[in-house]
Amino acid sequence: MRQKLAGRSSRTAPKVVVLMGGPSAEREVSLSSGRECAMALRQAGYEVVELDAGRDLPARLAEHAPDVVFNALHGRWGEDGCVQGLLEWLGWRYTHSGVLASALAMDKTRAKEILRLAGLPVLEGLVADADEVRARHVMAPPYVVKPNDEGSSVGVYIVHEAANGPPQLSEQMPARVMVETYAPGRELTVAVLGDRALGVTEIMTEGWYDYDAKYKPGGSRHVIPAEIPEKIAAACREQAVRAHQALGCRGLTRTDFRWDESRGLDGLVILEVNTQPGMTPTSLAPEQAVHAGMDFPALCRWIVEEALCRA
């Protein structure tokens, strides 16, 4: 019998509400993540409720009265500190990073400022009006344009050196976008669980690691452990943990890198830190956990127990 939680009767199996779906552009991915996590948590012995997050979330949480909320939301509202603030206000324990770390990591410009102050390698970039980016090159090509506060490679444009003109951004792009120097090289990623780096994966694709490459079967190939020099792998692991700590993250995160092997260690740069890594069958963090000896139900159990242990 587990220890009684404040305001709740004790129960043999903690009750977990898995938040999924929501209103963001990444709704379908979140639904997939949520279903996978709910299944794993049931296998791990928890009582599980799957909840598609909407405006009635406070009332529905009160109805189900969970011991912990498993946040499987992606994108705006669920990943940027908003739902975290709501859960804090309502007094529910929840998984993954808190309000400030979530908001900082989702805002790519502010996250890079924090990482740079921590002595970590990041790309040069700026924030510009989308109309200005459509009208002229706001920096010398090659460069990348993307939303400043979206994830999962939503709305990413690569402008090559040979480009005839500036990118014609879709009307769905936000009014302000991030423009940053293009980083050539290999795509590497490291999942961090607590303060432990789980491994280094190289992501192999035909082109850019975009939304389809991330989430469609066969869209990319993951090589774990990455076939890179140990010096580079060790730097990836160390920098991922430092990035996790600099932003004040907790639970599970994933840090993405590019590595230009022609420049050695100087060619390693952090692209971003993801506080709500995908938890689908093709996602990277669960693969790294398995490689580290932790199957998917055990990973989900660790995430829940870490949240339950917080004051």
Image (tube, rainbow, N blue to C red):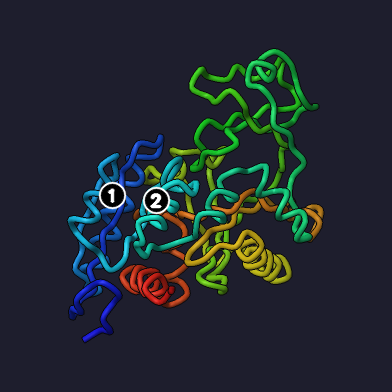
Q: Are marks 1 and 2 in contact (CB under 8 Å)?
A: yes
Q: Residues within 10 Å of mark 1 (few under 14, many from 20)?
A: few
Q: The residue under label 1 is which amino acid type?
A: Pro
- Whether 104 is drawn above or below 178: the answer is below
- Whether 41 is drawn above or below 29: the answer is below
Residue at the location (68% across, 71% down)?
A: 234
Which of marks 2 and 1 precedes in the sequence?
A: 1
Residue at the location (39% across, 74% down)?
A: 302
- Whether 290 is drawn above or below 74: the answer is below
Q: Residues within 10 Å of mark 2 (few under 14, many from 20)?
A: some
Residue at the location (46% across, 42% down)?
A: 213
Q: Residue furthest bottom?
A: 1
Residue 86: assigned label: 2
Q: The residue under label 2 is which amino acid type?
A: Leu
* Occupied quadrant, residue 176: top right
* Occupied quadrant, residue 12: bottom left
User: Is 205 placed left or right of 15 in the picture?
Assistant: right
Q: Quadrant of the C terminus?
A: bottom left
Q: Where does residue 202 sit, x and y in percent of width and height?
A: 57, 57
User: Is 241 placed left or right of 304 in the picture?
Assistant: right
**SS class of the residue under badge 1?**
helix
**SS class of the residue under badge 2?**
helix
Residue that label 1 marks? 58
Q: Where does residue 258 sit, x and y in percent of width and height?
A: 67, 50
User: Is 282 placed left or right of 151 in the picture?
Assistant: left
Q: Where does residue 272 sit, x and y in percent of width and height?
A: 61, 50
Q: How many marks?
A: 2
Q: Residue furthest top?
A: 135
> In front here: 262 or 279?
279
Viewer can see residue 193: yes
Viewer can see residue 261: no
> In front here: 249 or 283?
249
